[in-house]
Amino acid sequence: MNDFYEVIQDDENFLVIYKKPNTSFHSDDGQAGLFEKVKQHQGLGELYPVHRLDKVTSGVLLMAKTASANRELVEQFKNRQIEKYYLAISNKKPKKKQGLIKGDMEPARRGAWKLSATQNNPAVTQFFSCSLAQGKRLFVIKPHTGKTHQIRVALKSLGSPIMGDVLYADALACVNTDRVYLHAFSLAFSLQGISYRFTEFPKEGENFLSAEFQSAIQEFVHPWKLAWPKI
């Protein structure tokens, strides 16, 4: 047990961890990032970052322990064969309650990104949502691409920026908020002919631990079983 991650499964070919929020994946300002910490803590001479999560995001994270596993998994990410689902909470009403968000991502100010109307190399995101107490809304999100800040920008484009996200939400959405409410909920992949699926509920944040969230999430416990429209 440590302040940065928990091991979910330690396989000879891969490592799946629960990343805690506010933990940088890569080393920053001379401080070892999550990847280096995991490599050191687990005593691994060989470890590969198959994908990453934003500093503010908690949840399921996959790393490869061999070069061959890394090649196979990276290829699956590249070909959009990895199944990913996220959870988010907003305190702003969305323009629509479910659907598809698609558009190119363009750099904006302060290191942020914005969604464009063009479709040259678009970020593709599907979502469902349901209401929570006090005007809040729970989103279950299925990204089909892996662009920087993709989900954060997608919900911002709906008029429902994620609670606590100072980069994309206004001050009222962040006041007295104990974290950014974005969580990598479920990840499915195959390796050497074997299929794997890992699902982890969020463990940090009063809104993720609230009674209304625990009730609402029952509708989304198995997000892969939802009626996602084909795109």
Image (spheres, grey):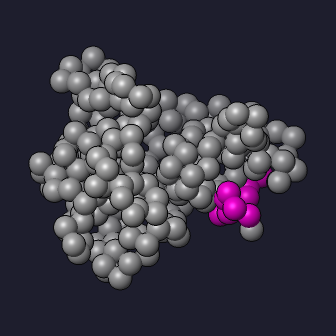
Q: Position of residue 117 (x, y in %)?
A: 18, 24
Closer-to-camera residue (24/66): 24
Q: Where does the C terminus fall, quadrant-wise?
A: top left
Q: Position of residue 154 (x, y in %)?
A: 28, 40
| Residue 15 to residue 211: above or below | above
Q: Where does the N terminus fall, quadrant-wise?
A: bottom right
Residue positioned 41% across, 28% down in the render: 110
Residue 2, picture quadrant: bottom right
Instruction: Classify residue 158 as left or right of residue 54.
Output: left
Residue 31 visible within the image: yes
| Residue 160 to residue 144: above or below | below
Q: Position of residue 124 (x, y in %)?
A: 30, 35
Q: Residue furthest top?
A: 120
> Start and end of the magenta stretch?
2-12
Residue positioned 50% across, 51% down in the render: 57
> Is residue 226 one of those drawn in magenta?
no
Residue positioned 64% across, 55% down in the render: 16
Residue 187 visible within the image: no
Residue 172, picture quadrant: bottom left
Residue positioned 32% across, 60% down in the render: 89
| Residue 58 to residue 50: above or below | below
Residue 116, picture quadrant: top left
Closer-to-camera residue (190/137): 137
> What number of labels is visible?
0
Q: Position of residue 85 (x, y in %)?
A: 40, 53
